[in-house]
Image: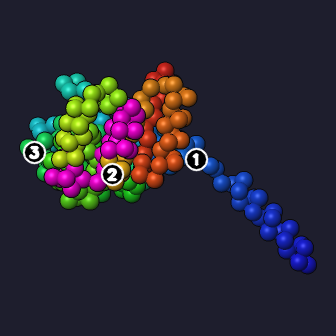
Amino acid sequence: MKKIFCIVLVVLAVFAYSCTKPSEHPSKVWLHRANDIAKAKYFQDKYVGLEVDVHWVDTLNTFVVQHDFGVNSKLRLEDWFAAIDKRSDLGFWIDYKNLDYNNMEASAKEMARLREAYGLQGMVIVESSNAGCLKAFEDQQFRTSYYIPFAYPDQLNQEKLQALTDKIRRNIKENNLKTISGYFFQYQFMKDSFPEMRKLIWYELYDTVVRNNYIRLAEEDDMTDVVLVAVMDTINY
C-alpha cells in the first residue's frame, strides 16, 4: 500500500511539472522599446515586463508613445495599455522623456489614473533623467529610477569620472533616490560607484553572446532588478 501511495505521488508530481510552462525569459529580463502595439501584443506572453517610451503633451493632457522628440506620435499611452491583453500580469518600465517641473504633478496624477483604469498590478517603473521631478511619482506610489547621464566611464580620465560620480551622487542624495538606470556599458561603473543603489540596465544591441552575459550578470546581482533586451525589428509580429 505504501509503495502504491509513493507511485501515485510521483505520477502526480510529474503531471504537475509537465503542465507548468516555464517562462521563456527569467523574471529580470524585460523587452526593450515595445513602442508599437503589434510588438507589445506579440511579446506580452514572452517577457514578464515591457519598456515603453513616452512624452507628455500639455495640449492633450496625456502621454503619447514616442522615443524621439518632435515625432508627433498619435498613439496615446492609454490606447497602448488598452491593447495589451495581459497587462495585469506584466511589469512596465515607463521611459519618460520630457518630465519637468511644469508637467510633473499633472503627469503623475494621470499615470496613477492609468494604473487604476487598466489594472496594472505588476511593477510600474517611471524613469527619467530629471532626478528632481521623480518625487511626484513616488508620492503616487510608483517605483522610480534616475537615468544617469550618458557617458562611457572607461573612456573618461580620473578627473571627469570623479565629476560624473559626484554629480550622480549629489542628485541621489538631494532627491532621496533608491534606483538608478543606465546602458550596459555603464553597469560596472554603477556597480562599483553606487553599490547601495538598486539598478536597472539595458542592452539594445543584438549580439547574443554579450546580451546573455549581461543577463547572467543581472541574474547574479541582487542589486540589479531589470535588464532590458532588444529584438530584431525584422520579426514579423
> Which residue: 75% across, 58% down?
15
> Could you tell which of marks 2 and 3 lies nearer the N-terminus?
3
Residue ranking furthest to the bottom = 1
- Rounded to the nearest angstrom, the CA distance separating label 2 from label 1 is 28 Å
Give residue 219's position: percent from left, percent from top: 51, 47
The quadrant of the image that shows the N terminus is bottom right
> Which residue: 21% across, 56% down?
176
Q: Which residue is mark 2?
A: 197
> Could you tell which of marks 1 and 3 lies nearer the N-terminus?
1
Q: Is residue 41 left or right of residue 196?
A: right
- The relative height of residue 71 versus residue 216 in the rendered view (above or below) is above
2 vs 3, front mark: 2
Give residue 23's position: percent from left, percent from top: 58, 47
Under tag 3, what secondary structure? loop
Which of the colour schemes (rainbow, by chain, secondary structure, one colour) is used?
A: rainbow
Q: Is residue 57 left or right of residue 165?
A: left
Q: Residues within 10 Å of mark 3 (few under 14, many from 20)?
A: few
Give residue 205's position: percent from left, percent from top: 44, 26
Q: Is residue 188 left or right of residue 47?
A: left
Task: Tell me which secondary structure the magenta stretch mostly adopts.
Answer: helix
Q: Which residue is mark 1?
A: 23
Q: Is residue 128 visible?
A: no
Q: Which residue is mark 3?
A: 101
Q: Which amino acid type is shown beneath numbered disc 2?
A: Met
Q: Quadrant of residue 6?
A: bottom right
Under tag 2, what secondary structure? loop
2 vs 1, front mark: 2
Query: Start and end of the magenta stretch?
Result: 171-193
Q: Which amino acid type is shown beneath numbered disc 3?
A: Tyr
Give residue 111's position: percent from left, percent from top: 24, 50
